[in-house]
């Protein structure tokens, strides 16, 4: 008798002992364990030839799951990892949900590279086979102090003639550090040959964003808005 190794075509002779015995052509496994599951090969030879037959043994065990850690508190921007420890056999699928919504993740390890405020909540790991399912739950909390974005400095209304350049500045604060975007009459602005948007973070954590327009035209007029948002 042979047993194939981990679903490959490589095979090894079955190791006989007090629990696993061979009586003539019969392989007897006492007190079967999950690790006994697999595909077996029986080969019979005599002086005029040989025959072989394969069979699959599945040793079932109740499914169970547990997520480690069950609760963790992670600061904004830091990574977080949940590991779903499963037991039982067979295990056909693994899936994750957050607050009851599927995440489309099928690995035993769930990693969040950079925690955002929307990542906080309850995470569930589900393991299933054709007969049963099991699940486990863990919680991700946000560390540090959350401060909603706040505009600290904005610009005043201006009336300009066509031709000169225009410079607008906006300063915002918040934790996590917000990102500033610009709009003109409700349409988001991006860099062009005449229009440049940039930002930087000061030592105190404030975000400074500026909007530069060279040689303004009449169609540059309108309602400008700077928007600060945290991810």
Image (tube, helix red, strand yellow):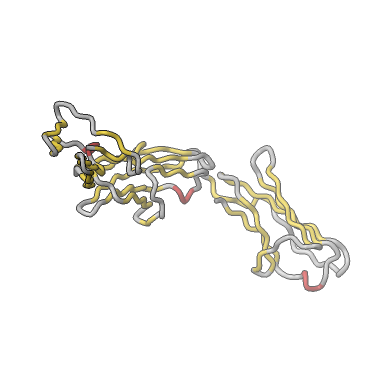
Q: Nearer the viewer, residue 85 or 38?
A: 38
Q: Nearer the viewer, residue 33 or 181?
A: 33
Q: Could you say where residue 138 lies in the image, as x and y percent from the top left?
A: 34, 43
> Does 206 appear above or below 212?
above
Residue most extreme to the front: 48
Residue most extreme to the bottom: 219
> Does 45 appear above or below 189?
above
Residue 227 is left or right of residue 192, and the answer is left
Q: Nearer the viewer, residue 131 or 27?
A: 27
Q: Nearer the viewer, residue 109 or 70?
A: 109
Residue 223 is left or right of residue 109, and the answer is right
Residue for point 60% across, 45% down: 177
Tell me, yes or no, if residue 62 can be seen here.
Answer: no
Residue 102's image quarter?
A: bottom left
Q: How many marks?
A: 0
Q: Could you say where residue 21 lies in the image, as x and y percent from the top left?
A: 14, 31
Q: Could you say where residue 223 lies in the image, as x and y percent from the top left?
A: 70, 68
Residue for point 25% across, 46% down: 90
Residue 78 is left or right of residue 44, and the answer is right
Tell me, yes or no, if residue 187 can be seen here.
Answer: yes
Q: Could you say where residue 8 lies in the image, as x and y percent from the top left?
A: 35, 43
Residue for point 86% across, 69% down: 161
Image quarter (top left, top right, bottom left or bottom right) of the N terminus? top left
Residue 11's image quarter?
A: top left
Residue 81 is left or right of residue 114, and the answer is left
Residue most extreme to the right: 163
């Amino acid at each position: 008798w042979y047993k194939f190794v981990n679903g490959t075509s490589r095979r090894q002779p079955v190791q006989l002992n007090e629990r696993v015995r061979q009586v003539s052509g019969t392989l007897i496994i006492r007190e079967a364990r999950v690790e006994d599951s697999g595909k077996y090969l029986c080969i019979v030879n005599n002086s005029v030839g040989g025959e072989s037959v394969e069979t699959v043994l599945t040793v079932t065990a109740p499914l169970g799951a547990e997520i480690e850690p069950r609760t963790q508190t992670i600061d904004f921007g830091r990574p977080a990892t949940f590991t779903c420890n499963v037991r039982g056999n067979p295990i056909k699928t693994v899936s994750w949900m957050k607050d009851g919504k599927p995440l489309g993740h099928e690995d035993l390890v769930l990693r969040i590279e950079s925690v955002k405020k929307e990542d906080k909540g309850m995470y569930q790991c589900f393991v299933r086979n054709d007969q049963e399912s099991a699940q486990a739950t863990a919680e991700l909390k946000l560390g540090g102090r959350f401060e909603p974005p706040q505009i600290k400095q904005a610009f005043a209304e201006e009336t300009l003639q066509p031709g000169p350049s225009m410079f607008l500045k906006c300063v915002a604060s918040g934790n996590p550090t917000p990102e500033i975007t610009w709009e003109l009459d409700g349409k988001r602005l991006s860099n062009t040959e005449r229009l440049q948007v940039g930002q930087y973070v000061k030592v105190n954590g404030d975000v400074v964003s500026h909007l530069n327009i060279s040689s303004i035209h009449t169609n540059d007029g309108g309602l400008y808005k700077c928007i600060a948002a945290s991810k």
